[in-house]
Amino acid sequence: MPVHNSEIADKLNETADLLEIKGENQFRIRAYRGAARTIESLSQDAAQMTEAGKDLSELPGIGRDLAGKIKKIVSTGTFPLLDRLHKQVPAGLRDIMKVSGMGGKRVKKMFEALKVKNIDDLKTAARRHEIRELEGFGEKIEQSIIEGIERMETAKPRMPIAVVDEIARPLLEYLSREKKVKNIDAAGSYRRRTETVGDLDILVTCKQGSQIMDRFTKYENVEKVVSQGNTKSTVLLRSGFQVDLRVLPQVSYGSALVYFTGSKAHNVAIRRIALKKKLKMNEYGVFKLPSGRRKKERRIAGKSEKQVYQTIDLSYIPPELRENRGEVEAAKKRKLPKLIELDDIRGDLHVHTARTDGKYSLKDMVEAAQRRGYEYVGVTDHSKKVRVAHGMDKKRLREEIRAIDKLQKKVKGITILKGIEVDILEDGSLDLPQSVLKDLDFTVCSVHSKFKLSRKKQTGRVLKAMDNAHFSIFAHPTGRRINEREPYEIDIEEILRGARERNVLVELNAHPHRLDLNDRGCKTAKELGVKIVISTDAHAAGDLDSMRFGVGQARRGWLEKKDVANTRNLKQLRRLLKR
DNA sequence: GCCGTTTTCGGCCCGACTGTTTTCAGTCG
C-alpha cells in the first residue's frame, strides 16, 4: 500500500505542531508546514515521483533535508524525528492546540506550570480557576478557553459549498442594504469555489460614517460576536459557522481581495515575487519600499486585483486557480488557461426522472432543461441492480425509450438524448444486455455496489467495463460523498489512462455532495487528454442548477471549454460519444 | 529548514484584535 500525499502532509503538519509546542525556531516550523502544503497540492503521488527517481528537493519549500525525510517516509513508512517528538511531547497537547486561542506558547506554559496534558486537564484547570493565576493569563482568557473547548466539541466539519452558498447569499444581500456600502464581496475559499468551506470572509468598502459593523453584528442569525473592531469583526452564526467582515478603503480593495481570497500558499508565492522586485505587498496595496532620498514607501497598486497582479508582472489569475499549483508560473509565462464558464454548457447528461428515483416526470425534467437554454438533455434513469431506486430492467428501459420518442415529437428546440445510468457489476460487466444498450444514444456507467474491493480489483472492474463498446461516460469516478463517505479504493490515474485509450468520457458529477471527479483529478484528466462531462445527476428540476458548482470545480481543475464535452453542439457531442 | 540575478549567511509576510499589560505578547488568518 503506497503512502499517500495526505499521509505525508499529516506527518509534516504534526511535526510542525509538536515543534511549536516545544518552542522551536518558528521558521523551522514554518518550513515543515510549507512542505506539507506543497506535498498536499501535488497532482502526483510523491511516492511515485520518488520511485521514478525524481528529486523532491526541486519542489518549492522542500530542500535537501526534507526531501530526504519524505523519501524515508514513502520508502520505509517511518519518520524518526516525529517518533522522537512523540516521546518528548504528550499526545494530548496537540489536541489542545486546536482549541481557539491556544497556540504553542500557551500550551507549553500550561503544561509546564499546571501539568495540563490533554483537553480534560485543560477543562479542569479552567474550572478550578488555575489558569487566571498564571502570568500573562487572566479571567477572560480562562473564560475564552472554556468557550473554545465547548465550541470545538460541537464544531461541524467544513460545509459543502452549496450549503455555504445558502448562508452567504442572504447575508451579503442584508449587508449591501446598508446605503453607504460601495463594494461587497465574499472572499476566501468560498470565492475560490473549494468543495467545502470552513468560514466566510466578507470584504466591503463604504463611505465615512457607515454603520456597517453594527449592522453586521446585529444580523438576526448571529449567535455570538467573537470580536468587533473598526475594520474587522468576527461573529458566529447560529449554525456554528464563522463569518469575518473587513472594512477597507477603496484604494486597497483589490489588494484586500487578493489577500483574503488566498489561498495562503498562493499569497506566499506572489509575495515572494513582489519581494524580489523590492515591493511590499499586503492587504492595503503594493508598495515601493523607501530608497535613496525618498523616506516614505509609496503605493503603486491596490485598487483592483488586475492592477495588483500586473504590478508584479503576472497576468490576472482567476480565484479558482489560486492554490499555488503552478498558476503563478503559468501567469508569469502568460500561459494561464482560459477557464470554462457556466454559459459554455450546452446540456446536462445525467438526469433522473420519476421512472426510477427522480422526483419529476420526464416532461418536467426536459422542460426544466429547456428553461436553462440547453440544446440537449440526456435522460439517464437507473438500471435494475439499484433496487432501492426502482432501477429499470430491459422492458422498462424500452418503455422509457418509447416515452422519449413520443415526447420528442412534441417539444421543440431541445434534443432529448436516450441514456441510462447503468451499473458496473462486480465482474466488470454492465447491468443490461447489449441488445438494449445499442438502442441508446449513450450510457452513464457507475459503481453503486462492492465499494470495498481492493484497489487493484476495483480498478480492473472499471477498466473491464470500459471495454464494453456501449460504455460512454464513467460517472462519479471515486464514489465519494463529501463529509459522508470516503472514495472507494481506485487508481484514478490508471482509470484516466484507460479512458483515454478507449475514447471514453469521464464525468465531473456536479452534485454538491459529490463533486467527483475532484479538482486534481480534472487537472490530471486534462493533462492526459481525457474529455470531461459536467453533469448534475439531477433528481429534481431545481437540481439542474448545481451545474454552477460543477463548473466551479472544473475551473479549479484548470479545465477550458475545449476540455469539456458538453460545451459542444449536438453534432459534435454525438461524435465524441461515438467510440 | 528553505532560499539565493544584491546573498551559501541571514533573512524568512504582516496587520488586526484581544487581553494583560502600561508597551507588548499571543493568536489568527
Image (cartoon, coloured by chain):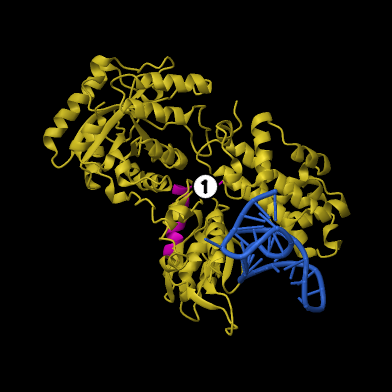
Chain corresponding to blue in the figure: B
Q: Position of residue A479 (x, y in %)?
A: 46, 31
Residue A74 in sight in this render: yes
Please tell me in which quadrant of the rendered image residue B7 appears. Answer: bottom right
Q: Give yes or no for residue A21 being in the magenta stretch.
A: no
Give SS at disc 1: strand
Tell me the quadrant of the picture where the N terminus of chain A can be found.
top right
Q: Position of residue A489 (x, y in %)?
A: 52, 27
| Viewer-closest of A209 and A555 | A555
Q: Tell me the chain of label 1.
A: A
The tally of labels here is: 1
Can I make out residue A242 in this image?
Answer: no
- Give the residue at mark 1: A159
Per the image, is A163 magenta?
Answer: yes
Q: Position of residue A470 (x, y in %)?
A: 28, 22
Residue at x 48% of width, y 60% of height: A187
Instruction: Examine the rendered structure and indicate whether residue A309 appears above or below residue A357.
Output: below
Q: Which chain is yellow?
A: A
* Residue drawn at x 85%, y 61% as measured from the top left: A134
Residue at image position (56%, 56%) is: A264
Give the residue type that dot 1 points to: Met
Q: Which residues are magenta?
A: A158-174
Horizontal placement of A187 versus A10: left or right?
left
Q: Which residue is outermost to the left?
A: A409
Secondary structure mostly seen in magenta is: helix
